[in-house]
Amino acid sequence: MRIVVLISALLWIGCQPITPQTNTSNKYFNLSGFAQELLISQAKDKNSVVKITQVNNVEERNSGFYPDSSFWAIELSSLLNANLNKPSLSDAYSIQSNVSEKNSNLLKTVYTASPETNAHITLLEVKYLKNPKEVRQIIAFIKSENSVYNTHQVINLWLNKYGSQLLIDSIYMQGFNKTVLLDSMKYSSKVVVVR
């Protein structure tokens, strides 16, 4: 089971284009930079995690282990590879700012990709407390389609501030992969940090 999940993650990462970061100002939320900062913070966090993975209705549970930076790099890989600020996407997204979140004290900024663009992130919601720098939740809808594979994924990332550090409370992702010559795969993964 672990091998299937690892191979799927590596295939998905390997199929993503590598986009170098430039020093230009970001028009949109710097998701890959934000994920890189989280990766650095999480590597210093000494709390254990519980991870529940399900692939085609087969569940695996790992609990009470202490993750290293490679664990977080895999868990955050979809966000680390997501660059909304590529020059080719300069006018790809409409932005709604300071949207009130129902039944919550959070506000959100919503980035919606135009249907005709080739954006991998089709919808991004960044939820925050009063100030956009106080991020508490990120929801990303990601898709990649070509003649070899078709993948759709939703990622929910919940964060909180502990001292001066913004750290992950949990990550939930679910998705669908179809690769030529392989069976389709439905998967979900939940990681909860035990504090």
Image: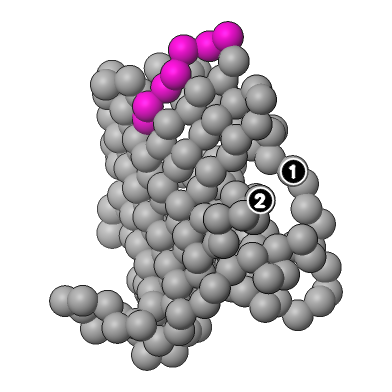
Is tag 2's residue or tag 1's residue first in the polypeptide sequence?
1
The amino acid at mark 2 is: Asn
Helix, strand or loop for disc 1? loop
**Percent coordinates x, y for residue 108 in the rendering:** 39, 78
Q: Is residue 162 left or right of residue 119?
A: left
Report the residue at 62% width, 74% height from top.
28
Asked whether residue 98 is drawn in magenta, I would say no
Residue found farthest to the front:
116
Q: CA distance from mark 2 to mark 1?
A: 12 Å
What residue type is disc 1 on? Pro
Mark 1, Cα crowd under 10 Å, few <14 / some 14-19 / many 20+, is few
Nearer to me, 72 or 179: 179
- Please give the label number shown on residue 79: none
- Looking at this view, name the residue that lies furthest to the top: 181
In percent of the image, x 59 and y 15: which residue is there? Answer: 180
Image-based side of 113 in relation to 88, left or right: left
> Quarter-wise, where is residue 53 in the image?
top left
Vertical order, 23 against 82 (above or below): below
* Residue 114 seen in this snapshot: yes
Q: Nearer the viewer, residue 81 or 88?
A: 88
Percent of width and height locating residue 140: 46, 56
Span shown in magenta:
181-187
- Mark 2 touching mark 1, by CB under 8 A? no
Q: Is residue 40 visible?
A: no
**Label at residue 17:** 1
Q: Is residue 41 above or below residue 177?
A: below
Colouring of the image: one colour
Where does label 2 land, which residue? Answer: 118
